[in-house]
Image (cartoon, helix red, strand yellow):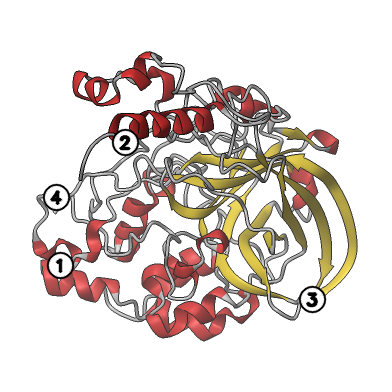
Amino acid sequence: MATLAPGEAAASSHREAPLISGTPQYDNTDLYAFVSPDHPDTTTIVANWIPFEEPAGGPNFFPFAEDAQYDIHVDNNGDAQGDLLFRYTFKTHVKNKKTFLYNTGAVESLDDPDLNVTQTYDLELVKLKGRKEVHRTKLADDVPVAPSNVGKASMPDYRKLRDQAVYHLPNGAKSFAGQADDPFFLDLRVFDLLYGGDLSEVGNDTLKGYNVNSIALQLPTDLITESSHQPVVGIWSTTQRRNAQGYYTQVSRLGNPLVNEVVNPLKDKDTFNASTPRDDARFLKNVTNPELPKLIEAIYKIKAPTEPRNDLVDVFLKGVKGLNQPPYVTPAEELRLNTSVKPTMHPKRLGVLDGDNAGFPNGRRLTDDVIDASLQVVEGELVGSKNDLGDAVDKNDKDFEKSFPYVALPTEGSRGSTAKTDAAVRSQLGDALTGSSTSDTPLIAASAGAGAAGILLVGGGLLWWRRTRGRAY
């Protein structure tokens, strides 16, 4: 049973609630917070949106929404109310609206004229007291976003574009927004009734090859903590969408992974996405009387721990006492991080469960196996039911970066010029592939501003018409 697939593994917040599943631009997928391994006086927060980005999903690819506020909240005193809010808002810019192309040639830089569709963002810091705004500061204005990775022909050096999208803020802070490999790793096929009792299929990373849109912030730790004597912060991310009346309404929320997928039943999922941590008492029964252990007992005959599950309240709503639980804490669903715990050179994927206090549930690093750790806790690891349950996916399919923004480069949408064309395709393309033409086949003819791809499409179409116009049907 050591490879039991976790029933809560719903790709953290990928399509976790009925309403948000239909609007992926506003859907939080995952949230990470950790002490920066290469700059331990800073804290890095990574928040992801837009699940299951198919890399070849053009021609419009995957922009951030312009009618949304993408927010990262920080509670630095444990009262379940935000004290700091970092707000990202995005604008889309199109150079040439007469082409369908995302880019009209090879893109060498973020300001390359061949990058036809671009985005920029503004970043604001809002300081709060209770529910009231007390101060607002614009930290960045019109910062370029790293584009979707169209392919190697379009973006031959995507890492260069990623590096150019890292923006340096005052006081040594950094910001990034753009596409990245989805860092969450798990075997997602558990919704087939927890594999129907058959564990032969586990061990496949279902999110391999998919991308997300990432927002990353690296901040001086003393900017976000209440004081050196109270180093624990609670973090969550939200999305607000502008309605027809021009007002913003919260439509998505994420703190700890896996909460709204499995802990909350269908009747509460949309309500949770519109709620704030200070109102989380309404969801308490979902934590103290969870459904998942009962399902595992029914299918795999592993006895569910005794309820009420106060151990889950302590770990996931308050923080681990003596580690990341703030004094006078108000129970709430936040990702809690003790920023005074220094990063380790050799992270253990199970984090605190394996004696590595720099990992989950003390914050969440990109390498933390939150599926296995959460499943073992849900199945009673902290109340005497020792187990080694997991989904047999122990790491991401791509290595993470050693420096900010740490997330792996996105999978490209096309192999482009590096692809090898087999004999069958060559035969089908014929003259169009070899570049042969006649005077009545203008393969290289286009109006000013047309891209190479448009020329090839027009030429190929004329070539087909010339070859077939004399046929009788």
Tell me if label 3 and label 4 are in contact, CB under 8 Å: no
Tell me which numbered mark, 1 or 4, is placed earlier along the sequence. Answer: 4
Residue at the spot of label 2:
469
The amino acid on which the numbered mark 1 sits, given as a three-letter code, is Ile
Residue at the spot of label 4:
201
Tell me which numbered mark, 3 or 1, is placed earlier along the sequence. Answer: 3
Residue 29 place in picture, x, y as percent: 49, 56
Residue at the spot of label 1:
302
The answer to whether any part of residue 414 appears in the image is no
Distance between the Cα atoms at labels 4 and 2?
53 Å
Depth-wise, is mark 3 or mark 4 nearer the camera?
Answer: 4
Tell me which numbered mark, 2 or 3, is placed earlier along the sequence. Answer: 3
Residue at figure coordinates x 36%, y 35% from the top left: 465
Residue 331 place in picture, x, y as percent: 57, 74
Disc on res. 131: 3
Query: Which quadrant of the figure contains the N terminus?
Result: bottom left
Question: Mark 3: few, some, or many residues within 10 Å (few <14, many ≥20)?
Answer: few
The amino acid on which the numbered mark 4 sits, given as a three-letter code, is Glu
The amino acid on which the numbered mark 2 sits, given as a three-letter code, is Arg
Distance between the Cα atoms at labels 1 and 4?
20 Å
Tell me if label 2 and label 3 are in contact, CB under 8 Å: no
Residue at figure coordinates x 35%, y 81% from the top left: 289
Callout 2 secondary element: loop
Residue 182 place in picture, x, y as percent: 45, 44
Distance between the Cα atoms at labels 3 and 4?
48 Å
The answer to whether any part of residue 268 appears in the image is yes
Residue at figure coordinates x 47%, y 50% from the top left: 360
Distance between the Cα atoms at labels 3 and 1?
45 Å
Tell me if label 2 and label 1 are in contact, CB under 8 Å: no
